Amino acid sequence: MENDNSPRPSRLPGLARARSSAERLRLRLASQQGALLLAMLGLVCGALAGLVTVAFRFTIESLQMVLVPDGFDALDPVRRLALPVIGAVLTIGTLVWLNRGYLRVGVLHVLERLSYHEGQLPARHALVQFAAGTIVLSCGLALGREGPSIHLGAASSSLLGQWVRVPHNSLRTLVGCGVAAAIAASFNTPLAGVALAMEVVLLEFTVVSMTPVILAAVSGAAVGHLFYGSSALLVVPQLSMVSLWELPYIVAMGIAIGALAAGFIRLVRTLTRESRRRPWWLRMLAAAVLIGGCGLLVPAVMGIGYDTINLALIGGYGMAALAGLVAVKLIATAIGIAAGFPGGLIGPTLVIGAAAGSMLGMIGTALAPGSSSDVGLYAMIGMGAMMGATLQAPLAALLAIVELTGNLNIVLPGMLAIVTASLATKELFSSNSIFTTQMRELGLDHAHDPVMQALRSIAVTAVMLRSFRTASTLLPVEQASALLESTPQWIVIDTEPCKTLLPAADLARHLASNPQGDVDLLAIPARRLSASSIQAEATLQAGLEQLTRDQADALWVQSRWSGHGDDGIVGVVTREQIDAAYRYVPGDDGRSNKGLQTS
């Protein structure tokens, strides 16, 4: 019996037209032709991510006003030790209550979902991140709010994209929009948010993806300005470099901070390996005790740390205090990250970098009293160098310190120090970025491959062939002839457990020589392709992976919006189409079935 692949007539013509319009828009997004639509979605995602991020920040600040109204430094030793432990107990209880087990959250979760799930972030993980992240950051567990903000922004954008069922190539871009908007809203750093989204999360700089990400950062920053104003997060005088003779010393400073960043990354890796041998709840409790002990030694290591940075920028610490802050903050942060607390590490790297830079500034002043810049300038340089080296994201680090301080004089020495530190960490000390290192420790990968990037940028609906008919295995000759009346290219045979594709030309040749009797589509002389199903939102990368996994030759694309229900077939894609997709540029009319050129 023949199955017609044309949409079923709808009893609601208006709904049918809306569905058809939505499908056309999704098809444009699938082939990267819907730049205006994606930009509009970026604006909406940015505003949504901004609201979620502001709510997260407000919740943390409100809880801190209750727990530590005068700051962590004002706590007595007993409370300074007890508060992180209480935070760990509450975090464990929250994780068990919300999920009955441990869930991965933060930047690593976002990278994992991009690498293995095409940017589909679950709502439950975001709920865990909001609740547990609030507890961790309010109880002074030596981590920052950047990681949770990135997760929440990315999740809100991803959930919106999943709700409107955008193709997964566009969903990935919306995740980047959420990341940029979250950073922009939380720290008033829209440029750094864009750079971080492109340089660390999406691993690409293309006009198609950057345009909506920039607009998302704008809308996210606007939301942040609405609630927190437009002033820079850090208060620092407009310092500048005194002499060009300082540049060699800044190079040496970059190498030193690159070594510090490499040590930090290796410490995180070592502690992560050791802690994985213990139950997750036990390592959190042990880490909380150790972090509380670090707080007893150096109270400034507790909390998010922006007050500490401000004090380092104005030279408020002596050499011994700075050395202790660098060492203890680095250890406490590494312990918290390795234990799996749902907090961020970018803020702590800024604290460590500011303290280390201030130390090196004091040393420079001692070596050349008359020709050295202010210690605050070196603290700013140290912030960028430590962040850039740890993340291996020099552009994001440079833009972050410029926007956080509002000081353009930092650009020249900052560029030199950040690039030197990043190179030293990677080339001299053989350390990858901390996120890459953490993912590899977990058996995951977030590598940048040009071919995979090209395949990720196109959805299967952009290259699929719509010229097909569906049929059962055995047909009367009249029905077989009727299949060919619309001159399809493929016949989709309904077989189990997977479908089979038959070239319509092979069926036509058989009917020409055998005009009578029943036709067995699995027995006639023909080329047949085993086919596996894939959702219409999937990218070509997911399609290629599914072909390999199922050992199939082709894909039949299904969509619940097709008018056939959940199993509706809307097109077919062969392995040859996927292999050729990244070698050709689409036509100017946007209707080409070819993909992007990568060479």
Image (cartoon, rainbow, N blue to C red):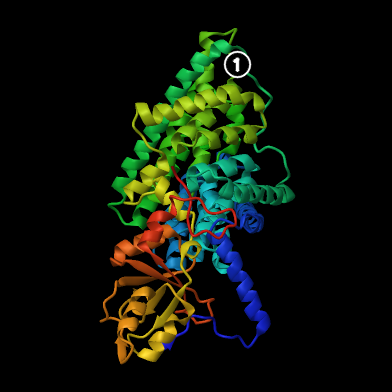
Residue 12, percent from left and from top:
65, 85
* Horizontal relation, residue 407 to residue 173: left or right: right
* Horizontal relation, residue 13 to residue 179: left or right: right
Residue 588, percent from left and from top:
59, 53
332 or 542, which is in the foreground?
542
Q: In this rendering, is residue 467 above or below 443? A: below
Three-letter code for the amino acid on which mark 1 is drawn: Ser
Image quadrant in which you'd find residue 291: top left
* Horizontal relation, residue 366 to residue 291: left or right: right
365 or 487, which is in the foreground?
487
Image quadrant in which the N terminus is located:
bottom left
Tell me what residue is drawn at x 63 percent, y 71 percent: 21
Q: Quickly name the residue at label 1.
A: 373
Tell me what residue is drawn at x 43 percent, y 23 percent: 256
Q: In this rendering, is residue 450 above or below 545? A: above
578 or 513, which is in the foreground?
513
Can the viewer see residue 21 in this picture? yes
Image quadrant in which the C terminus is located:
top left
Residue 525, percent from left and from top:
26, 77
Characterize the local packing of mark 1: few (<14), some (14-19) or many (20 or more) Cα atoms within 10 angstroms. many
Image quadrant in which you'd find residue 238: top right
What is the secondary structure assignment of the residue under circle 1?
A: loop
Can the viewer see residue 109 in this picture? no
Residue 400, percent from left and from top:
59, 36
